[in-house]
Image (cartoon, rainbow, N blue to C red):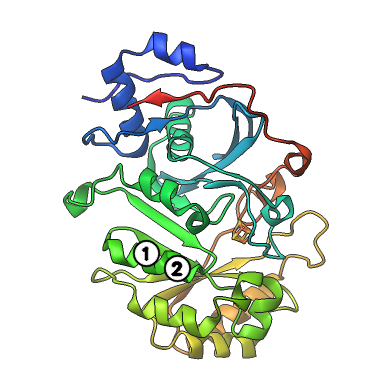
């Protein structure tokens, strides 16, 4: 049975504990991530209060404040058309990020701290319960590199048991900057229902190392080997994220080089028009440049599509998350985490 709706806006641990019987709390927690329950996961959900929200039509960016005075950011994205409307939720795995991608707002914060599995799931709970939307797809594309916080991310995902029939599994995408150790560890789990997205953003090592420092260690040759070894279900593919940055990686030659690099990888290139971060040295690409890049990729035989830009004005689009004030805010250990045992 579905748990009764719970408004967790502004609730504290005591509110939750006193308002919810244990079994309801468990069901709410599981219901937050998936529409069908499973067994207790033995972890806790930290339902931090939603302290800010910004809307652009049906797109909602919401911020939860943690007891140590930090913030998580999540974005509810309307998907589909006409009667087939559904929502995707972009969640964070860390506060800030230490990967240093030069086009990304979150990178400017540095890593403030990892989120716990409970705090990760708590974002889904807030989306479903506070905003009352049906989340069909969960994507780890908010603040942070998921494989830099591997254990907590996997614990959060584990709530959906891998032995479920495919039809009951919610869609979850883990997007990585290209951490090869993380891709290989995930591959070893054999959870083929998870979708893997790799943030590539360049057609060669020279450009990638300039905009993504991780590439100096985990270069594109090693990355391609890890992608080729990644187990995929039939009819699925790796999503290659490609942020199109004017004057950096957006020429037709770059598109052809990218198609060559990916020739043997079963993948779809998701071209994401660059969303300028604060004080960005680059503008957003023109429509003509986006169209030319996509057409060149197609002509070279590469399956690709364009990510529709949403939330740019709210700083809620890809690569734009992160409150700059957090970099000056020290985590305080004064308050105990708001946690809900499940
Ligand atoms: S793009 Fe992703 S991995 Fe790179 S700095 Fe931003 S959040 Fe971190």
Quadrant hosting residue 61: top right
User: Tag 1, which secondary structure?
Assistant: helix
**Inter-mark Cα distance, 1 to 2:** 6 Å
Q: Residue at x 48, y 78 (%)?
A: 223
The quadrant where ligand 1 appears is: bottom right
Q: Name the spot of residue 170 as percent of width and height, x first.
A: 30, 48
Query: Which numbered tag is attached to residue 181?
Result: 2
Q: Residue at x 69, y 56 (%)?
A: 107
User: Tag 2, which secondary structure?
Assistant: helix
Q: Name the spot of residue 13 as percent of width and height, x first.
A: 48, 17
Q: Which residue is mark 1?
A: 185
Q: In the rendered view, would you say 26 is above or below 208?
A: above
Q: Residue furthest front?
A: 333
- Pointer 1 and pointer 2: residues touching (CB < 8 Å)? yes
Q: Residue at x 28, y 45 (%)?
A: 160
Can residue 89 be seen here?
yes
Pick the front one: 296 or 206? 206
- The N terminus is located in which quarter? top left
Q: Name the spot of residue 326 as percent of width and height, x first.
A: 73, 40
Can residue 84 be seen here?
no
Q: Callout 1: few (<14), some (14-19), or many (20+) C-alpha neighbours within 10 Å?
A: few
Q: Is mark 2 within 8 Å of ligand 1?
A: no
Badge count: 2
Q: In the rendered view, would you say 272 is above or below 131?
A: below
């Amino acid at each position: 049975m579905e748990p009764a709706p719970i408004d967790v806006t502004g609730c504290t641990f005591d509110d939750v504990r006193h308002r919810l019987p244990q079994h309801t709390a468990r069901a709410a927690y599981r219901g937050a991530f998936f529409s069908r329950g499973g067994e207790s996961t033995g972890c806790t959900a930290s339902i931090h209060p939603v302290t800010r929200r910004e809307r652009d039509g049906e797109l909602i960016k919401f911020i939860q404040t943690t007891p140590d005075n930090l913030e998580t950011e999540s974005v509810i994205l309307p998907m589909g058309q006409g009667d087939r409307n559904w929502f995707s939720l972009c969640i964070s795995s860390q506060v800030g990020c230490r990967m240093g991608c030069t086009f990304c707002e979150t990178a400017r914060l540095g890593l403030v701290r990892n989120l716990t599995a409970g705090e990760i799931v708590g974002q889904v709970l807030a989306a479903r319960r506070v905003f009352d939307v049906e989340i069909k797809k969960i994507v780890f594309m908010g603040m942070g590199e998921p494989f830099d916080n591997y254990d907590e991310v996997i614990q959060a995902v584990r709530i959906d048991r891998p032995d479920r029939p495919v039809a009951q599994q919610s869609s979850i995408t883990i997007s990585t900057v290209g951490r090869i150790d993380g891709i290989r560890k995930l591959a070893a789990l054999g959870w083929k229902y998870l979708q893997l997205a790799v943030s590539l953003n360049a057609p060669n090592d020279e450009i990638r190392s300039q905009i993504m420092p991780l590439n100096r260690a985990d270069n594109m040759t090693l990355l391609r080997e890890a992608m080729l070894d990644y187990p995929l279900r039939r009819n699925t593919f790796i999503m290659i994220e490609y942020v199109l940055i004017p004057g950096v990686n957006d020429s037709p030659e770059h598109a052809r080089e990218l198609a060559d690099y990916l020739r043997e990888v079963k993948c779809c290139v998701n071209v994401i028009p660059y969303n300028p971060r604060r004080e960005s040295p680059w503008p957003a690409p023109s429509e003509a440049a986006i169209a030319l890049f996509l057409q060149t990729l197609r002509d070279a035989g590469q399956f690709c599509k364009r990510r529709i830009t949403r939330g740019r004005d709210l700083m809620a689009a890809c690569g734009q998350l992160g409150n700059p004030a957090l970099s000056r805010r020290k985590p305080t250990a004064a308050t105990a985490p708001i946690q809900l045992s499940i």
